[in-house]
Amino acid sequence: MHPAVLAVVVVVCVLAVVAVIIGVWFACTPSREDGIYQLADLVYGIVPAKRAYKYPDSIAAKYCTAAKRPPGWTARIEEKYDHFSMDLFAPLVPAHDLDDNHVLVHVRIGEVIEDTDVTVDEYLAGEDFVVQDATDAVIGITGTGKGMNGKGDGVPRGYVRPLHYYDHVASMLPPHIRRVTLVAGVLFPQPLPKSKDYVRRVTEHFTSLGYDVDHRVTLEPDWRVADDDFAFLASARHFVPSGGGYSRLAKLMVERRGGQVYEPARESW
């Protein structure tokens, strides 16, 4: 074989081996999302069912089993609600016995606040930072510093609610409700300075409106807590959602069980 041809063959072989090694590395190296427990995304089929089956005692795993979903199954993003059955899901969610004199408020914290360059002041002011629609935002959350509600992409007035949203909520609540329970959790283990500040300031805001405020806030990811918090929210007599699939799913459960949901029209906040 001519030396030049041999050299080309060697280079091609080396490049092929390198490509295989890189491919195997990417296939075997977990991303931040691998293994995390996302209840709503799992039951809606946005992420593969196999992630639910890693937590066999979870609500998501029981639902995927009841729905007979293969481990690798996912729904197309535009059909994510079409494959969900409330009739299968609702019996899997335990009920808490809650009274009628307080409201449960789901507060979205974690990566949707921390992985952006938006300040807590900007979130609380409710400014519009975004240029893309909700579907693009959900697909495009990559931890690049722009993400949900970020200045480059995200959901307008979406996941993280501003203070005037809660002002509208307060105007809708029956007068006998004077107790607020803030409920929040996180998906990833990460520093949470903005999340803590956001919860503190929402607490102060409800206190300034005359409510007694307590918390059910967990700052470490735990599927058991996520499931129990969901069951707690789903049992609310009075419920205020935030943005995202988890809150949407809790809202559907509250309505199914006869509770009242307080969600101001988007154009009002």
Image (cartoon, helix red, strand yellow):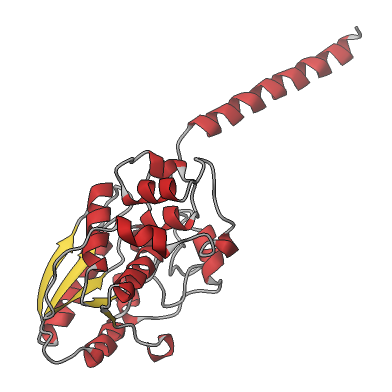
Q: Nearer the viewer, residue 220 or 177?
A: 177
Q: Nearer the viewer, residue 201 or 182?
A: 182
User: Measuring 60% from the left and 24% from the top, which residue is drawn there?
Assistant: 21
Left or right relative to 187: residue 184:
left
Name the spot of residue 54 as percent of width and height, x first.
Answer: 37, 38
* Vertical arrangement, residue 63 with respect to residue 72, above or below: below
Left or right relative to 89: residue 230:
left
User: Measuring 18% from the left and 90% from the top, which residue is drawn there?
Assistant: 174
* Vertical arrangement, residue 254 with respect to residue 96, above or below: below
Q: Which residue extends farthest right? A: 2
Left or right relative to 196: residue 45:
right
Name the spot of residue 65 as percent of width and height, x first.
Answer: 42, 45
For residue 56, which quarter of the picture?
top left
Quadrant containing the C terminus is bottom left
* Vertical arrangement, residue 77 with respect to residue 177, above or below: above
Q: Which residue extends farthest top? A: 1
User: Measuring 45% from the left and 36% from the top, which residue is drawn there?
Assistant: 30
Name the spot of residue 214 as percent of width and height, x first.
Answer: 10, 70
User: Measuring 48% from the left and 50% from the top, which residue is drawn there?
Assistant: 47
Q: Is residue 46 visible?
A: yes
Q: Is residue 222 visible?
A: no
Quadrant containing the N terminus is top right
Name the spot of residue 46 as percent of width and height, x first.
Answer: 50, 55
Q: Nearer the viewer, residue 48 or 139?
A: 48
Q: Nearer the viewer, residue 115 or 217?
A: 217
* Vertical arrangement, residue 180 with respect to residue 167, above or below: above
Label tally: 0
